Image: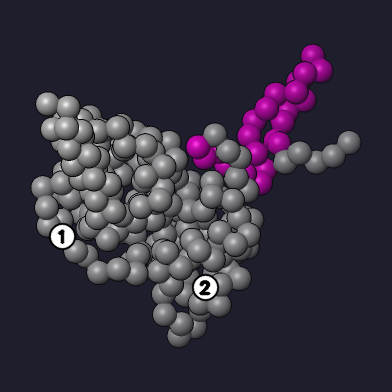
Amino acid sequence: MYRSGDLVAWRADGTLEFLGRTDGQVKVRGFRVETGEVEAALVTHPAVGDAAVVPHTDPASGRTVLVGHVVPAGGAPVPGAAELRAHLAVSLPEHMLPAVFSTLEALPLTANGKVDRQALPAPRQRLATGTDYEAPATPTEELIAQVWQELLGAERVGVRDDFFELGGDSLLALRTVSRINALFGTAMAPRALFDGPTVAETAASVEELVLAELESAAGTS
Protein backbone atom coordinates (compact mmCIF):
# COMPACT_ATOMS: atom_id res chain seq x y z
CA MET A 1 0.00 0.00 0.00
CA TYR A 2 1.18 3.53 -0.69
CA ARG A 3 -0.24 7.03 -0.68
CA SER A 4 -0.94 8.15 -4.23
CA GLY A 5 -2.21 11.64 -3.44
CA ASP A 6 -5.56 10.84 -5.06
CA LEU A 7 -8.80 11.80 -3.34
CA VAL A 8 -11.37 9.01 -3.73
CA ALA A 9 -14.71 7.92 -2.35
CA TRP A 10 -15.36 4.26 -1.53
CA ARG A 11 -18.81 3.52 -2.94
CA ALA A 12 -21.27 1.01 -1.51
CA ASP A 13 -20.59 -1.46 -4.33
CA GLY A 14 -16.89 -1.55 -3.44
CA THR A 15 -15.61 0.60 -6.31
CA LEU A 16 -13.46 3.68 -5.82
CA GLU A 17 -14.65 6.97 -7.31
CA PHE A 18 -11.85 9.40 -8.22
CA LEU A 19 -12.61 12.91 -6.96
CA GLY A 20 -9.35 14.77 -7.54
CA ARG A 21 -5.88 15.31 -6.10
CA THR A 22 -4.97 16.13 -2.52
CA ASP A 23 -1.59 17.61 -3.45
CA GLY A 24 -0.36 20.28 -5.84
CA GLN A 25 -0.01 18.02 -8.86
CA VAL A 26 -1.37 19.52 -12.08
CA LYS A 27 -1.26 18.51 -15.73
CA VAL A 28 0.47 20.88 -18.15
CA ARG A 29 1.24 20.06 -21.81
CA GLY A 30 0.57 16.37 -21.12
CA PHE A 31 2.97 16.21 -18.16
CA ARG A 32 2.04 15.85 -14.51
CA VAL A 33 3.81 18.56 -12.55
CA GLU A 34 4.13 18.84 -8.78
CA THR A 35 3.90 22.59 -8.23
CA GLY A 36 5.42 22.28 -4.76
CA GLU A 37 8.62 20.99 -6.32
CA VAL A 38 8.82 24.04 -8.59
CA GLU A 39 8.15 26.36 -5.65
CA ALA A 40 10.87 24.71 -3.60
CA ALA A 41 13.35 25.24 -6.44
CA LEU A 42 12.32 28.87 -6.86
CA VAL A 43 12.94 29.83 -3.24
CA THR A 44 16.51 28.52 -3.45
CA HIS A 45 17.27 31.60 -5.54
CA PRO A 46 18.84 34.14 -3.15
CA ALA A 47 16.61 36.98 -4.39
CA VAL A 48 13.33 35.04 -3.93
CA GLY A 49 11.77 35.12 -0.49
CA ASP A 50 8.59 33.18 -1.24
CA ALA A 51 6.89 31.63 -4.26
CA ALA A 52 3.67 30.05 -5.47
CA VAL A 53 3.25 28.22 -8.77
CA VAL A 54 -0.16 27.67 -10.36
CA PRO A 55 -1.48 26.65 -13.78
CA HIS A 56 -3.18 29.29 -15.92
CA THR A 57 -5.18 28.76 -19.11
CA ASP A 58 -4.90 31.61 -21.59
CA PRO A 59 -8.44 32.42 -22.78
CA ALA A 60 -7.21 33.53 -26.21
CA SER A 61 -5.10 30.52 -27.16
CA GLY A 62 -6.53 27.90 -24.79
CA ARG A 63 -2.98 26.93 -23.74
CA THR A 64 -2.31 26.02 -20.12
CA VAL A 65 1.02 27.19 -18.72
CA LEU A 66 2.63 27.42 -15.31
CA VAL A 67 2.74 30.84 -13.68
CA GLY A 68 5.37 31.55 -11.05
CA HIS A 69 4.39 34.19 -8.49
CA VAL A 70 7.47 35.34 -6.60
CA VAL A 71 7.97 37.53 -3.55
CA PRO A 72 11.42 39.18 -3.52
CA ALA A 73 13.64 38.60 -0.51
CA GLY A 74 13.95 41.66 1.70
CA GLY A 75 15.59 44.49 -0.20
CA ALA A 76 16.65 42.27 -3.12
CA PRO A 77 15.98 43.38 -6.72
CA VAL A 78 13.28 41.44 -8.56
CA PRO A 79 14.91 38.66 -10.63
CA GLY A 80 14.12 38.68 -14.34
CA ALA A 81 12.29 35.83 -16.05
CA ALA A 82 15.43 34.71 -17.89
CA GLU A 83 17.40 34.51 -14.64
CA LEU A 84 14.65 32.59 -12.85
CA ARG A 85 14.22 30.10 -15.69
CA ALA A 86 17.98 29.55 -15.89
CA HIS A 87 18.07 28.95 -12.14
CA LEU A 88 15.24 26.41 -12.32
CA ALA A 89 16.68 24.67 -15.38
CA VAL A 90 19.63 23.49 -13.30
CA SER A 91 17.41 21.08 -11.35
CA LEU A 92 14.11 20.84 -13.25
CA PRO A 93 13.14 19.60 -16.73
CA GLU A 94 11.87 22.08 -19.34
CA HIS A 95 8.19 21.18 -18.92
CA MET A 96 8.33 22.18 -15.23
CA LEU A 97 9.59 25.70 -15.92
CA PRO A 98 6.96 28.45 -15.57
CA ALA A 99 6.26 30.23 -18.84
CA VAL A 100 5.18 33.41 -17.06
CA PHE A 101 6.34 35.11 -13.87
CA SER A 102 4.79 37.84 -11.77
CA THR A 103 6.10 39.64 -8.71
CA LEU A 104 4.02 40.23 -5.59
CA GLU A 105 4.70 42.05 -2.34
CA ALA A 106 3.28 39.06 -0.46
CA LEU A 107 1.36 35.88 -1.23
CA PRO A 108 -2.35 35.98 -0.35
CA LEU A 109 -3.22 33.73 2.59
CA THR A 110 -6.36 31.99 3.77
CA ALA A 111 -7.71 32.30 7.30
CA ASN A 112 -5.70 29.16 8.13
CA GLY A 113 -2.46 30.79 7.01
CA LYS A 114 -2.08 28.73 3.82
CA VAL A 115 -1.48 30.25 0.39
CA ASP A 116 -4.81 31.25 -1.14
CA ARG A 117 -4.21 30.07 -4.69
CA GLN A 118 -7.64 31.21 -5.82
CA ALA A 119 -6.71 34.78 -4.87
CA LEU A 120 -3.49 34.85 -6.89
CA PRO A 121 -3.87 37.36 -9.74
CA ALA A 122 -4.09 36.25 -13.35
CA PRO A 123 -0.88 37.09 -15.19
CA ARG A 124 -1.03 40.46 -16.90
CA GLN A 125 2.60 41.30 -17.46
CA ARG A 126 5.70 39.14 -17.59
CA LEU A 127 8.81 40.12 -15.73
CA ALA A 128 11.51 41.79 -17.75
CA THR A 129 13.50 39.39 -19.90
CA GLY A 130 16.66 41.33 -19.27
CA THR A 131 16.62 43.07 -22.68
CA ASP A 132 15.23 46.47 -23.63
CA TYR A 133 12.45 46.57 -26.20
CA GLU A 134 13.73 46.97 -29.74
CA ALA A 135 11.14 47.41 -32.48
CA PRO A 136 11.29 45.33 -35.68
CA ALA A 137 13.36 47.12 -38.31
CA THR A 138 12.62 45.10 -41.45
CA PRO A 139 9.46 43.74 -43.11
CA THR A 140 10.61 40.21 -42.27
CA GLU A 141 11.05 41.05 -38.58
CA GLU A 142 7.67 42.81 -38.51
CA LEU A 143 5.84 39.78 -39.93
CA ILE A 144 7.59 37.35 -37.58
CA ALA A 145 6.86 39.59 -34.58
CA GLN A 146 3.18 39.64 -35.60
CA VAL A 147 3.11 35.84 -35.75
CA TRP A 148 4.64 35.62 -32.27
CA GLN A 149 2.20 38.17 -30.86
CA GLU A 150 -0.76 36.22 -32.20
CA LEU A 151 0.36 32.73 -31.17
CA LEU A 152 1.91 33.74 -27.82
CA GLY A 153 -0.86 36.17 -26.89
CA ALA A 154 1.75 38.88 -26.25
CA GLU A 155 0.92 42.57 -26.40
CA ARG A 156 4.29 43.54 -27.88
CA VAL A 157 7.25 41.57 -29.19
CA GLY A 158 10.68 43.08 -29.79
CA VAL A 159 13.39 41.74 -32.05
CA ARG A 160 15.55 40.69 -29.06
CA ASP A 161 12.76 38.92 -27.13
CA ASP A 162 13.21 35.18 -26.62
CA PHE A 163 10.38 32.97 -27.93
CA PHE A 164 10.57 30.58 -25.00
CA GLU A 165 10.89 33.28 -22.34
CA LEU A 166 7.66 34.76 -23.71
CA GLY A 167 5.82 31.51 -22.98
CA GLY A 168 6.56 29.43 -26.06
CA ASP A 169 7.02 25.67 -25.84
CA SER A 170 7.99 22.89 -28.24
CA LEU A 171 4.44 22.35 -29.54
CA LEU A 172 3.87 26.05 -30.12
CA ALA A 173 7.27 26.27 -31.80
CA LEU A 174 6.08 23.79 -34.43
CA ARG A 175 2.97 25.88 -35.12
CA THR A 176 5.06 29.04 -35.28
CA VAL A 177 7.55 27.61 -37.78
CA SER A 178 4.68 26.24 -39.87
CA ARG A 179 3.06 29.69 -39.96
CA ILE A 180 6.36 31.38 -40.87
CA ASN A 181 7.02 28.89 -43.69
CA ALA A 182 3.54 29.50 -45.08
CA LEU A 183 4.09 33.27 -45.03
CA PHE A 184 7.50 33.26 -46.71
CA GLY A 185 7.30 30.10 -48.81
CA THR A 186 10.31 28.64 -47.02
CA ALA A 187 11.15 25.26 -45.52
CA MET A 188 12.74 26.36 -42.26
CA ALA A 189 13.27 23.48 -39.85
CA PRO A 190 11.88 23.77 -36.28
CA ARG A 191 15.44 23.37 -34.98
CA ALA A 192 16.21 26.85 -36.31
CA LEU A 193 13.82 28.41 -33.81
CA PHE A 194 15.41 26.52 -30.93
CA ASP A 195 18.91 27.52 -32.04
CA GLY A 196 17.94 31.15 -32.68
CA PRO A 197 14.90 31.92 -30.50
CA THR A 198 14.71 35.71 -31.03
CA VAL A 199 12.79 37.52 -33.76
CA ALA A 200 16.06 38.89 -35.17
CA GLU A 201 17.65 35.44 -35.37
CA THR A 202 14.54 33.85 -36.88
CA ALA A 203 14.29 36.65 -39.45
CA ALA A 204 17.93 36.11 -40.39
CA SER A 205 17.28 32.38 -40.91
CA VAL A 206 14.25 33.13 -43.09
CA GLU A 207 16.13 35.67 -45.19
CA GLU A 208 19.01 33.23 -45.71
CA LEU A 209 16.57 30.58 -46.95
CA VAL A 210 14.81 33.03 -49.26
CA LEU A 211 18.14 34.20 -50.70
CA ALA A 212 19.35 30.63 -51.18
CA GLU A 213 16.16 29.73 -53.05
CA LEU A 214 16.47 32.82 -55.28
CA GLU A 215 20.09 31.99 -56.09
CA SER A 216 19.15 28.37 -56.83
CA ALA A 217 16.33 29.50 -59.13
CA ALA A 218 18.66 31.92 -60.92
CA GLY A 219 21.26 29.20 -61.39
CA THR A 220 18.81 26.85 -63.07
CA SER A 221 17.31 29.47 -65.37
The reply to whether residue 13 is in sight is yes
The main secondary structure of the magenta stretch is strand
Task: Tell me the magenta residue range.
Answer: 6-29
SS at mark 2 in the image: strand
Quadrant location, the C terminus: top left
Q: Quadrant of residue 110?
A: bottom right
As drawn, the label of residue 149 is: none
State whether residue 17 is above or below residue 210: above
Residue extending furthest right? 1
User: Which residue is depicted at the point 59% across and 51% down?
Assistant: 93
Callout 2: few (<14), some (14-19), or many (20+) C-alpha neighbours within 10 Å?
many
As drawn, the label of residue 135 is: 1
Q: Cα distance, mark 1 to mark 2?
A: 31 Å
User: Which residue is depicted at the point 41% across and 64% down?
Assistant: 81
Query: Would you name the residue on which mark 2 appears?
Result: 48
Q: Are marks 1 and 2 in contact (CB under 8 Å)?
A: no
Please state which of residues 165 and 8 is positioned toward the viewer in this rendering: 165
